[in-house]
């Protein structure tokens, strides 16, 4: 019997299914690889955005923790974070009006698929990001007698902690991304649109929260001026604060006014 040439030249159903199976496997692997690359890119962009916001906040802090002095008159205009202005605690900062429009936010904030861009603050082009300053205060005292058996109050030390909170697009993955992004805690919205600061109990919430001191706004930044910053801050402290001997002059031995008023120690963090 002579075999049919048309049948011998065709392909079987099994071969067709095998080809489709291999093609589907390649497609699935390609999609997963793309998703992995896309997720890595979103993580890196989010980290970049957080670092950029912290740097802008640090510059804003340097201007507003004390204030500005008019070069011609010497009149000091207190900054928005100065205690004399009775700032709220926490103080929420508008990214557009306070940072971007005033030149503190130099680099742009680009979209990241991990951020809920439709979240608050509504109407702000930086939706999903909430930045604020959290204040802590501590009484400053100076020793009057040996071994500090007697001390005298000389002022109040004011420290502002910077906080950047990011509203995640998928609330079910906030704990996972908190670890991947090395964030400080998870939190939720509090009074006045501020995000509750990190505490030992901050273990859940839709916001991934980062906290830094102004002096550590960008840990990876390297500048030849960095080594001079401690000396510069020390000079600022001596220039803007009375000496301790004057502040402890409660009896009027140095001045004619006993009981000198206390002062605030600012811009030291």
Image (cartoon, rainbow, N blue to C red):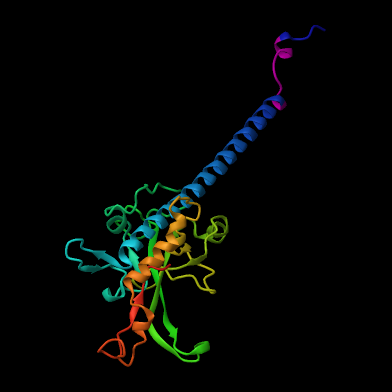
Where, by quadrant of the figure, is residue 2 drawn? top right
Q: Is residue 163 above or below residue 140?
A: above
Q: Is residue 167 above or below residue 153?
A: above
The residue positioned farthest toward the front in the image shown:
254
On the image, the x and y values in percent for residue 54 come to: 42, 57
Would residue 13 be counted in the magenta stretch? yes
Indicate the quadrant containing the C terminus: top left, top right, bottom left or bottom right: bottom left
In the image, taking residue 176 as reference, residue 152 lies left or right, namely left
| Residue 188 seen in this snapshot | yes
| Residue 155 seen in this snapshot | no
| Towards the viewer: 3 or 232 | 232
Task: Please name the residue shown 44% across and 48% down the image.
Answer: 112
On the image, the x and y values in percent for residue 77 come to: 23, 68
On the image, the x and y values in percent for residue 122 come to: 32, 59
In the image, taking residue 203 as reference, residue 7 lies left or right, namely right
The residue positioned farthest toward the top in the image shown:
2
| Towards the viewer: 64 or 164 | 64
Where, by quadrant of the figure, is residue 7 drawn? top right
Task: Please name the residue shown 51% across and 73% down the image.
Answer: 199
| Towards the viewer: 146 or 148 | 146
Q: How many marks?
A: 0
Indicate the quadrant containing the N terminus: top left, top right, bottom left or bottom right: top right
What segment carries the magenta color? 6-14
The residue positioned farthest toward the left in the image shown:
73
On the image, the x and y values in percent for residue 110 come to: 40, 46
Task: Please name the residue shown 52% across and 68% down the image.
Answer: 204
């Amino acid at each position: 019997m002579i075999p049919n040439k048309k049948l011998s030249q065709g392909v079987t159903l099994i071969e067709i299914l095998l080809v489709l199976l291999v093609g589907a496997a390649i497609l699935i692997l390609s999609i997963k690889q793309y998703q992995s690359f896309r997720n890595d890119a979103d993580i890196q962009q989010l980290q970049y955005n957080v670092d950029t916001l912290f740097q802008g906040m640090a510059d804003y802090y340097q201007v507003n923790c004390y204030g500005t002095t008019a070069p011609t008159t010497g009149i000091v205009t207190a900054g928005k974070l100065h205690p004399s202005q009775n700032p709220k605690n926490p103080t929420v900062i508008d990214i557009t009006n306070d940072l971007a429009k005033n030149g503190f936010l130099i680099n742009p904030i680009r979209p990241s698929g991990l951020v809920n861009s439709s979240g608050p603050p509504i109407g702000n082009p930086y939706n999903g990001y909430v930045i604020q300053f959290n204040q802590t205060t501590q009484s400053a005292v100076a020793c009057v007698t040996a071994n500090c058996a007697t001390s005298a109050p000389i002022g109040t030390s004011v420290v502002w902690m910077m906080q950047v909170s990011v509203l995640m697009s998928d609330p079910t993955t906030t704990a996972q991304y908190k670890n991947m992004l090395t964030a400080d805690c998870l939190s939720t919205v509090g009074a006045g649109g501020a995000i509750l600061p990190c505490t030992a109990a901050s273990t859940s919430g839709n916001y991934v929260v980062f906290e830094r001191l102004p002096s550590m706004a960008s840990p990876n930044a390297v500048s030849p001026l960095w080594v001079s910053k401690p000396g510069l801050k020390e000079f600022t402290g001596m220039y803007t604060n009375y000496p301790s001997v004057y502040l402890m002059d409660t009896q009027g031995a140095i001045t004619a006014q006993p009981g000198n008023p206390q002062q605030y120690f600012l811009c030291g963090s």
